[in-house]
Amino acid sequence: MSQHYHNAPPYPPSKYVMLEEQHGMPPPHYRRNVPRYHSRGRHSSCGCCLRCLCCLCCFFFLLIVAIAGLLFYFYTTYSPQVPSYSVDSFTTNAFDVGQDFSLYTEFLVTVKAVNPNEHISFIYGKGSSVEVLYANSSLCKGEVPYLEQGHKNTTLIKILLKGKSEFGSGLQEALMENRNTGRIPLTVKVKVPVIIVIGELPLNEIRVLVGCALVVDNISPHKKANVVSNVCTPDVEIPSSL
């Protein structure tokens, strides 16, 4: 009986293993720690954007410095000055009122243009317009003749203006009052294309606008009027194509 127990096969190994201590035992050999990869895409793209931004800022800074240098050279070398304009004389060739209250006028206006620049000249091109108004009513129109004005030059530009317009009783009464006082207010509007020439280099064409508030003592036909006062204000209009 005892021999039977001694010859009995040993118990088969258990398929289950009891863990003695969870905290003290190392992880099983089949459990792996997943490695963590740090993404570098965001840092790389941020660095590239910063470099591009720095290059762009440097480019604009150098561009501004270059433009400032060119402007400084231009002003110190050529010393540009704005030309001045004024009405030198005003002559009435015709001022006829018709029975239908229409008015035919013909004026000869002489404009004095002064160019004070030593190295800059002006070319007054074709396609200009000149208009004389009384009480915001157009009396006559004309144009500036083609003209090349050199350095340090004063030129008298003669402009012939003709026109026919409505001249109602209200305008007649106002004109008679002005004639009696010897102060007839007129407005002269000039619009002329101008090419600026620096040295021998012509620039792009611009449009010069001149508005003159003119006061004369009379507008009697075939009589030269005295210019009591005139204030001319020049302005520049740059075409959109530029």
Image (cartoon, helix red, strand yellow):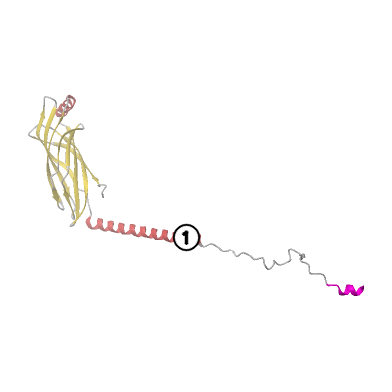
- Give the labeled residue for mark 1: 45
Hey, which quadrant is residue 180 in on the image? top left
Q: Nearer the viewer, residue 228 or 186?
A: 186
Residue 241: x %, y % from top left: 26, 48
**Which range is magenta?**
1-9
Q: Look at the numbered disc 1 and give the secondary structure of its residue.
A: helix
Give amino acid for label 1.
Ser
Instruction: Specify the quadrant that holds the N terminus.
Output: bottom right
Count of number-bearing discs: 1
Residue projecting furthest to the left:
222
Q: Nearer the viewer, residue 112 or 241?
A: 241
Residue 148: x %, y % from top left: 14, 50
Residue 105: x %, y % from top left: 12, 33
Hey, which quadrant is residue 2 in on the image? bottom right
Instruction: From the image, give the main secondary structure of the stretch colored magenta.
Output: helix
Residue 30 shown left or right of residue 39 in the figure: right
Q: Say above or below: 240 vs 102.
A: below
Residue projecting furthest to the right:
1
Q: Residues within 10 Å of mark 1 (few under 14, many from 20)?
A: few
Residue 88 shown left or right of residue 53 in the figure: left
Q: Say above or below: 26 vs 67.
A: below
Residue 240: x %, y % from top left: 27, 47
The question of residue 8 being in magenta is answered with yes
Q: Residue at x 28, y 58 (%)?
A: 70
Q: Residue at x 30, y 59 (%)?
A: 69
